[in-house]
Image (tube, grey):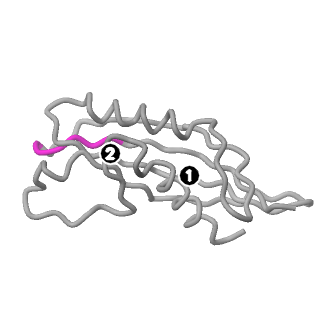
């Protein structure tokens, strides 16, 4: 099953892109010095971890995909609202990847930690996907 992490990240990207009130990227975009607020808010999909999810009958992977939220707002509200939008699109929803069975997509964690940065607010959410081969 190796190699399905990138497909799962693409699935999450495709599910979110155009469906939430922020721009979605596969990696943090290049920003001029000072991270101008004109590019915010935005969401970055990636930072995955893979674990075997095999039995004697089939092979699979369990993936944890992290979604990061960036906002230039002065409070955490914009990030928390975006986290809710993403939650509504991913948690326990029916998702599909060609050639792979997506058994489940579960929200595992969300946080908007206090950061030393004064020019943006960061939020982090993690989702666990269980994937098995199509038999």
Q: Residue at x 12, y 48 (%)?
A: 37
Q: Quadrant of residue 34?
A: bottom left
* SS under mark 1: strand
Q: With respect to residue 42, does 61 lie above or below?
A: below
Residue receiving disc 1: 64
- Left or right of residue 40: residue 118: left
Q: Quadrant of residue 57?
A: bottom right
- Left or right of residue 26: residue 109: right
Residue nearer the viewer, 10 or 131: 10
Give the alpha-carbon distance from disc 2 to disc 1, as whole Å: 16 Å
* SS under mark 2: strand
> Which image quadrant: the N terminus?
bottom right
Q: Give residue 40's position: percent from left, percent from top.
A: 21, 48
- Left or right of residue 47: residue 94: right
> Which image quadrant: the C terminus?
bottom right
Residue nearer the viewer, 17 or 2: 17
Q: Residues within 10 Å of mark 2 (few under 14, many from 20)?
A: many
Q: Quadrant of residue 55?
A: bottom right
Residue receiving disc 2: 69
Q: In the rendered structure, which segment of residues is drawn in magenta?
A: 118-123
């Amino acid at each position: 099953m190796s190699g399905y992490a990138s497909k799962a990240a693409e699935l999450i990207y495709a599910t979110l892109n155009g469906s939430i009130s922020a721009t979605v990227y596969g990696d943090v975009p290049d920003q001029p010095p000072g991270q101008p607020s004109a590019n915010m808010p935005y969401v970055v999909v990636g930072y995955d971890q893979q674990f075997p999810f095999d039995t004697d009958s089939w092979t699979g992977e369990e993936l944890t995909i992290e979604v990061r939220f960036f906002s230039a707002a002065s409070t955490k509200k914009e990030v928390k609202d975006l986290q809710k939008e993403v939650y509504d699109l991913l948690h326990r929803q029916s998702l599909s990847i060609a050639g792979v069975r997506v058994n489940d997509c579960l929200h595992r964690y969300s946080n908007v930690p206090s950061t030393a940065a004064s020019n943006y607010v960061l939020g982090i959410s993690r989702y666990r996907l269980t994937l098995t081969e199509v038999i």
